[in-house]
Image (tube, rainbow, N blue to C red):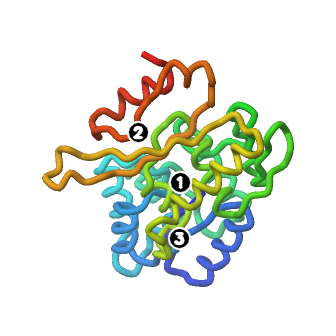
Amino acid sequence: MRLLLVEDNEELARLLTQRFQAAGYETDVLTTAAEAQTAVTTTRYAAMVLDLGLPDGDGLSVLREIRRREDPLPVLVLTARGGLQDRVTGLRGGADDYLVKPFAFEELLARLEALLRRPGQLLGRSLQVANLAFDTESRQAFIDDKPQVLSARETAVLELLMRRKDRVVSKKLVEDHIFGLSGDVASNAVEVYIHRLRKQLSERGAKVQIHTFAASDTSSPRKRRHDFIQIHLLEDHFLARHRVGYHCDLHAIGALLLLQMGGE
């Protein structure tokens, strides 16, 4: 799970990145409001930790722009502004939580995880799809209660798909989740990890199946292709009744998912 930390104090940012990593979170660090504005419009994050006193402007402007776009990104403000009016302004400006410096990391992490446990967010301590389970604290996958050995990035992809089971996941979202702003992304990296996961899950007896399909956006003059990924329960009787093709018009995706999930 990837976080965005917007903090211009380099030492604090370094320490927080280390502590977040130890807690199982990857972190992209930015130091200015302008960088943050760009990042949240191009990359999907599980949550943002936002300082307000940034060198090129007020972090509140970043927050207000996020909410103006109706982006549900959970935002925890972490700032030295501790006055009552400061806290009220931050929360009314769109912050989901507000923590004043100095602070204890344990409280910061607890508050962040409370945000991620809210309905519709990503955090849950245990994930289960058929006989495939994932412990988010130990970051260990199990098939029929037997621990499975996966690489760090295979684990990250599996966790993302399990959190969004029976929902379409775009290739771009998987890239953001794994690589963030690093830019170190081969054009076929997601396909490689999906291929490995699909092979390992099948060979090890997992009763789940990862489906990938491409959809063409016919509303675009160039008819761009969009790659999507879905994970759902493997039910032999259902798959025997419903054979679904995986190349479809972008506007037909909703119907495709209904057919796969419920046959309606």
Using the rendered view, name the quadrant where residue 258 is placed: top left
User: Which residue position holds label 3?
Assistant: 28
How many C-alpha atoms fall within 10 Å of the one at disc 2: few (<14), some, or many (≥20)?
some
Mark 3 vs 1, N-terminal side: 3
Amino acid at circle 2 = Tyr
> Which quadrant does the N terminus fall into?
bottom right
Q: Residue at x 47, y 65 (%)?
A: 188
Residue closest to the eye, 240 or 196:
240
Q: Residue at x 20, y 44 (%)?
A: 218
Tag 3, which secondary structure?
Answer: strand
Residue 118 visible, this orientation: yes
> Which quadrant does the C terminus fall into?
top left
- The residue most toward the left is 221
The answer to whether residue 81 is above or below residue 262 is: below
User: Which residue position holds label 2?
Assistant: 246
Q: Residue at x 55, y 25 (%)?
A: 239
Mark 3 vs 2, N-terminal side: 3
Amino acid at circle 3 = Asp
| Residue 46: mark in rendering | 1
